[in-house]
Amino acid sequence: MEALVTSFVLIFTSEMGDKSQLMSMAFATLFKVRTVLISIFIAALINNGIAVIFGSYITEYIPIFYIKFSAALLFLFFGISTLIEEETKQEKIKNSKYGPVATIISTYVLSEFGDKTQLAAIALTASYNSPLYILIGTTLGIFLADVLGIIVGIYFNKRIPSKYLKYLSSFIFIAFGLSTLYKLFF
């Protein structure tokens, strides 16, 4: 039980203001809250599952550079496509049964792969040797921190015209893409 509480508190506090929380906020302005919540939970579970089960071995086969580079390209793609999309196309994506879920999960998993949270989950698993408790604690920590981001996103969505939220959402994705590329090359 100590492993669960420790992993939850460590991850929850470290996620405050992190890119996954900001991504959740941005997604909440574009998609239905239920879709975002389900997608974020699945993505966090996938990410932490990878960390707990394969985390310490995966970078031996896929260099972290390529994973982070792919995440940067995804951020840039989503940011730019949000800027240039017509409203009707955005509405189709918003109302699509599978589009938003796949978008949110793939973006989240790739962007968080090799991140401090995933590395912390690896270290916690090694320290406590309680993979199930670490998986539960880290997943709940990330999910609840992201729920706070979603609540903020909903608040802004009700008070700011959608045109400006579109620009803000695009800016967040582009900024993360450029930031990731900068960290990779400089």
Image: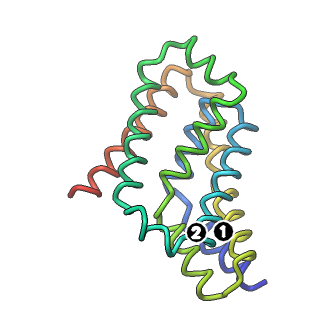
Left or right, residue 176 beside residue 99: left
Q: Residues within 10 Å of mark 2 (few under 14, many from 20)?
A: many
Check the picture and name the quadrant holding the N terminus. Answer: bottom right
Residue marked by disc 2: 51
Spatial CA distance of label 1 from label 2 is 10 Å
Find out whether the residues at labels 1 and 2 contact each other: C-beta distance under 8 Å.
yes
Residue at 51% x, 75% y is 56
Mark sitting on residue 59: none
Asked if residue 153 is positioned above or below residue 162 in the image, the reply reads below
Residue 117 drawn at (x, y percent): 53, 67
Determine the secondary structure under disc 2: helix
Colour scheme of the picture: rainbow
Picture residue at 34% right of the left edge, 52% below the top: 180
- What percent of the width, then of the height, locates residue 165? 52, 28
Disc 1 vs disc 2: which is toward the camera? Answer: 2
- From what the image shows, is residue 2 above or below residue 57? below
